[in-house]
Amino acid sequence: MNEFDLIREYFSWPSEDSDVVLGVGDDAAVVNVPTDQQLVMSTDTLIEGVHFSAQADPRDIAHKALAVNLSDIAAMGGQAKCFTLALSLPEIDKRWLGEFSSSLNELAGRYQVSLVGGDTTRGALSITINVIGLVESGSALKRSGASPGDGIYVSNTIGSAAYAWWQLNNDQKPSEENLERLHRPTPQLELGRALNGLASACIDISDGLEQDLGHILDCSNVGAIIELEDLPLDEELSDHVKRTSDYSIALCGGDDYELCFSMPKKRREWLLKRTRELNVRTTRIGEITKSLGMEIKGYSNNSSSYQHFK
Ligand code: ADP
Ligand code: MG
């Protein structure tokens, strides 16, 4: 099987999007962009041995590679449109490619994002996805818009993926749900769209709440007070915290790909209405302050609490 057969077999899917004028098969893709919209673009790479192990399920690798990119579009309040895939493979393994391709196709189908091109090379296993989204001109959610008095919110639960990872490394069995969160994160695209026009700043949590909220604070030149008691934790992590009083996984555990955003108080009713419609949970965990820095209430900063992640 040569490179062209491989592309035809595994990565040439018909696009249902009439804006995709040319997809896989030419020198480059051609995609229509509505006149009142802007492109939102993001790239992420996953490398074997760094981001996943040699034994990892190809379906999980494909899902995660696309999901983390879609999550960046979600954090910008954009709508995912299309993506390219640069794949470096040590060998042609048809079983691996079949599973990788079908999982990628499934997630792409769920969010109607078209695979429009890519590159295939021989080398150590790595996957780079470049995703392109659209946003109404001037309306992209940035890290820089938070103002003192805004509420700080997160979607669903935080620390769930990291707790699953911690359990795997400590001879404990994670819940099925948390394993799924770890291996097949859900990009919060619908929520991101809904936040466009509501949130003042937004980021997706890939490196942990403390670090990622820190980016919003830095970019917005503000500080925050966080209430530890208000962090939305799943049942397993909540039990762990009760047993150990250790909030480090909740605060510093990454890989959840939930959204963290700030929003003026007066928009709270709107947020509740929209999230009810979308069936997504959002929780207010604190407030943006004028004084810089992050004050975490209810947390005694003892150094051992951070050791798993730093
Ligand atoms: P070029 O020589 O112009 O870079 P390639 O031979 O690399 O073209 O690729 C041929 C076509 O297949 C292009 O349209 C490219 O976008 C597409 N392609 C290559 N690899 C992939 C891949 N892994 N997934 C999707 N499309 C791919
Ligand atoms: Mg090429």
Image (cartoon, rainbow, N blue to C red):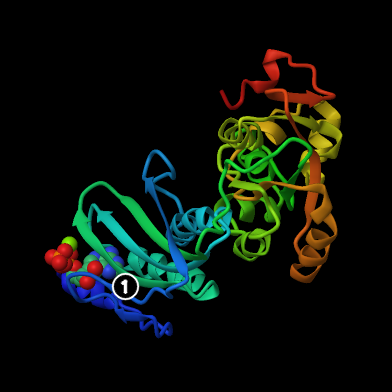
The N terminus is located in which quarter? bottom left
Q: Quadrant of residue 16?
A: bottom left
Pick whichever, 97 or 210, lies toward us: 210
Left or right relative to 260: residue 300: right
For the residue carrying disc 1, how many other residues have a C-alpha within 10 Å: few (<14), some (14-19), or many (20+)? many
The C terminus is located in which quarter? top right
Q: Which percent across, then down, holds residue 139?
A: 56, 59
Q: Quadrant of residue 51?
A: top left
The residue under the point 70% across, 55% down is: 177
Callout 1 secondary element: helix
The residue under the point 59% across, 63% down is: 189
Q: Which percent across, then down, holds residue 241?
A: 81, 32
Residue 1 can be seen in this image: no
Location of residue 13 with respect to 129 vertically, above or below: below
Most distant residue in the left direction: 2
Can you tell me whether the CB of the residue at mark 1 lies under 8 Å from the nearest atom of ligand 1? Answer: yes
Q: Which percent across, then down, holds residue 245?
A: 82, 25
Location of residue 2 with respect to 217 vertically, above or below: below
Location of residue 153 with respect to 213 vertically, above or below: below
